[in-house]
Image (spheres, rainbow, N blue to C red):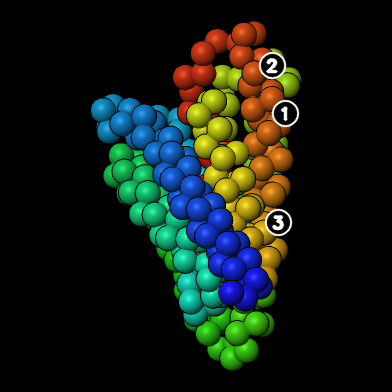
Amino acid sequence: MNPFVSVHDHYNIWKDVAGIAGNIFAFGLFVSPVDTFRRIIKSKSTELFSGLPYIYALLNCLLSAWYGSPLVSTGNTMVMSVNILGIVFQITYISVFITYAERDKKMKKLGLLLAIFSLFAAVAVGSLFITQLVTRRVFVGCLSGGALISMFASPLFVIKLVIRTRSVEYMPFYLSLSTFLMSTAFFVYGVLNSPPDPFIYVPNGIGTLLGIVQLALYFYYKDKSPTSNREPLILTYA
């Protein structure tokens, strides 16, 4: 048996395991806002909740799903599948938000949604005009990786708020845990890619570090603050 082939196959197995784990953890992340939207449906009002995190998450999922597609990169089926799942959840959440939003909010969110789909269509169609697959992968990878890094960096505002208020009220434990587990899984997935994929492991590595910080803060301040029962100020998705 060729030892190099066996090692390659071994890496592929662990890569697939990491990808499957990432999809499972991402599902937990995607369902975290369900209580918020259940409340919106029950009260038939969006109250003071913001729809912006879900619209931004939709753009991130669209770009990442396109990067994981065979038309852009090879061997990233798990990246494509998890983001397709994310797209379904975000469109569902946005639809509920728009349904119960006041007229002004409704029109603004519809305008933003149109802008998001237009931007994604421009990126997707434009990238197909790049004939060299390597160049196309770098182009889409930079956009998707940049969007993912900015989304993983957004909890910095929540971290600052937790330290200032000494309260984890706006940083739910399971949201932080799901973010950490999903980021770690896809960091491993990107490292085990052949060759290692920086457009996957770099942003998810940052997400892993921020997840560790959030969990550390949660356990430090959890006994000093009331039980978290508010909507997260910032929502992160892979």
User: What amino acid is at disc 1?
Assistant: Lys
Residue named by callout 2:
220
Q: Is residue 14 above or below residue 175?
A: below
Nearer to me, 146 or 105: 146
The mark that comes first in sequence, 2 or 3, is 3
- Where on the picture, by quarter, is residue 88? bottom left
Measuring 54% from the left and 52% from the top, which residue is drawn there? 18
User: What amino acid is at disc 3?
Assistant: Val
Instruction: Say which element carries label 3.
Output: helix
Would residue 94 be found to the left or right of residue 175 on screen? left
Marks 1, 2: nearer the viewer: 2
Q: Please rate how many residues cluster around mark 1, counting C-alpha atoms within 10 Å: few if below 14, some from 14 to 19, many from 20.
A: few
Would residue 41 be found to the left or right of residue 64 on screen? left
**Do the numbered discs 1 and 2 sit on residues whose CB atoms are within 8 Å?**
no
Q: CA distance from mark 2 to mark 3?
A: 27 Å
Q: Is residue 133 above or below residue 76?
A: below
User: What amino acid is at disc 2?
Assistant: Tyr
Dot label at residue 160: 1
Dot label at residue 202: 3
Instruction: Say which element carries label 1.
Output: helix
Q: Is residue 27 visible?
A: yes
Would residue 193 be found to the left or right of residue 41 on screen? right
Give x and y (percent) for residue 65: 48, 64
Figure quadrant of the N terminus? bottom right
Measuring 71% from the left and 40% from the top, which residue is drawn there? 209
Q: CA distance from mark 1 to mark 2?
A: 14 Å
Q: Is residue 107 visible?
A: no
Give x and y (percent) for residue 153: 68, 44
Give x and y (percent) for residue 26: 47, 45
